[in-house]
Image: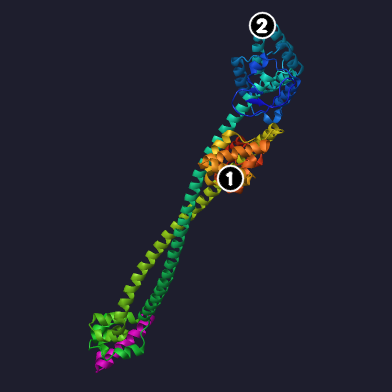
Amino acid sequence: MIIRGVKANRRNLIISFNRCKSPLLVENSKKLYTFTELEDCNVTDATLVQFTKIFVQRKRNKTTDMDDKDVKTMLSKLRNQRIKSNIIPDQICLFLEQRQVISSQDKASVEQKGDPSVKMLILLSLITRKGLEAYNTFVQALEENELFLVACHLYKEEKAITLSKLENKTKNIAEVREQLSCKEEEVDKLKKEKAEALSELEEKKEDIEKLREKLSVRKEEVKKLKEDTTRENDHQQRVVTSQDIQKIVDDVDDITRDLVASLRMPTPLGRNIEEEKTKKRDRIWEVLIKWKYSKGYRATLSTLKDVLLKLNQTKAAIKLSEMEELNEDVKHARAQSAKLRDDCDQLKEDLEKKSEELKNCSKELKQSRRAAKEMKTKKRIYVRAQSARSRNKLHQFNDNLEEEQRGHKTAGEHRLTDRHVEKICKDLGCCWQDLGKALKLPNPKIHDIDRTCHLSAAKAKEMLKKWRDQENDGATVKALVVALYEIGRFNVVENHLDPRACEGRTREYEEVWNKLCGPRDAI
């Protein structure tokens, strides 16, 4: 840490507290001083003391992000380092007792010891046991007693602990982002599976619709065949009429007795008919008429047909039932009916299987949707929580930074140094003349540089030095950045200068911003 700047009674000091990890030094025109050298040189000017007091004071409720474990670590480091100071333990104990941090017994135990170093060790042990509240009061006591060196050292340790915690939290955020990216991959995979399941579901629905159409067609065909079969059966079970007998009476042979026996009629009836009727046609007619009236509704067409076939009267049987026309149709219809029944059964089985598959697909789809929804909800809640934490940390850090940097120079307001000149003169090339005109360097000087120097880098270096000598305090980094932007050399600014110089923010502020929240453009 470097303290530079602010006018004192005996030295011209400019003090600024840069949050870097170097030791605290005081710079004047001749020498840099450490803490110990400051005490040896008796730098006790009122102005320096006043500024150091303002520098040490801070808002505890904003900057403190520690716990008892951190307090223990800091105080143990303080004991081990043995910083040279003029701390009076009795005054510190009195301040702590007034603030009711330690009891009178604790104060007496410290005052009993004669050696101040032993008293200090006992006091630090008491503060370590009391925790964070006691530590804050201890720092206030140091500030009240103007022990700013120790207070500054503790403040530096607080900042280091806070930054380490921020780095750990940044790492945790990066790990969480990796986990979220993995979850996003899983969500994408689930979406793909969902799309495939939906397409498969649509295909199965189409197959089911086709099967239903086929089933309805088969049902119509089966219904038609059933009607035909029923019609045929009704025809066979119809009662024999006189027209049926008249149709076949000429085709039946003279088998009166066999016909009477087959129709289960009395034998004497057959002899009487043979005696009474001389013609074959009359005898057959008389037998069939008497059988019809004697059997009544049981004298069906199928019974008569069976009897005729049994007696080898095929022609009469065929004519009776029109078998010549119906035989082939009935066989074909029966075969088709059996085939349709098998197809219908198979379609029913396929339909049941498809229905089961459809139900399973619907269940899997619902489960995948529910899982994806839960994952999205968890991710959204977690991202919101992490964003809120990051924003709070960022606002807190920004407030602290603005509080510390209030009244100090920004990076862009510093004067251009030789280091800046060495960095950028190599990349300027032939554009050094355009840069000189943008920096409002007179044309005669530019022509003199062009004649005296040979290499482009040397010309650019000489031009920047003459511009710096011409402008004095006006030759700042900010003015150079503006000129480089005017001539379009953005790469020089990005490679060798701070691109945020015009905004008044230091490079360290941008690094902390990027660590916490990523690039500004991404936000």
Magenta part of the chain: 274-298
Marks 2 and 1 sit apart, C-alpha to C-alpha, by 75 Å
Is residue 184 shown left or right of residue 409?
Answer: left
Q: Residue at x 69, y 31 (%)?
A: 404
Element marked by disc 1:
helix
Q: Which residue is mark 2?
A: 115
Q: Is residue 143 depicted above or below 381 in this figure?
A: above
Q: Residues within 10 Å of mark 1 (few under 14, many from 20)?
A: few
Q: Quadrant of residue 243?
A: bottom left
Q: Quadrant of residue 513?
A: top right
- Residue at the bottom extreme of this rendering: 278
Q: Amino acid at mark 1?
A: His
Depth check, mark 2 against mark 1: the one in front is: 1
Does the magenta segment cover residue 23?
Answer: no
What numbered label is drawn on residue 388? none
Q: Where, quadrant-wise, is the C terminus in this rendering?
A: top right
Cβ–Cβ below 8 Å for labels 2 and 1?
Answer: no
Q: Is residue 470 visible?
A: yes
- Residue 293 x %, y %: 36, 85
Q: Which residue is mark 1?
A: 447
Q: Residue at x 61, y 21 (%)?
A: 74
Is residue 463 shown left or right of residue 253?
Answer: right
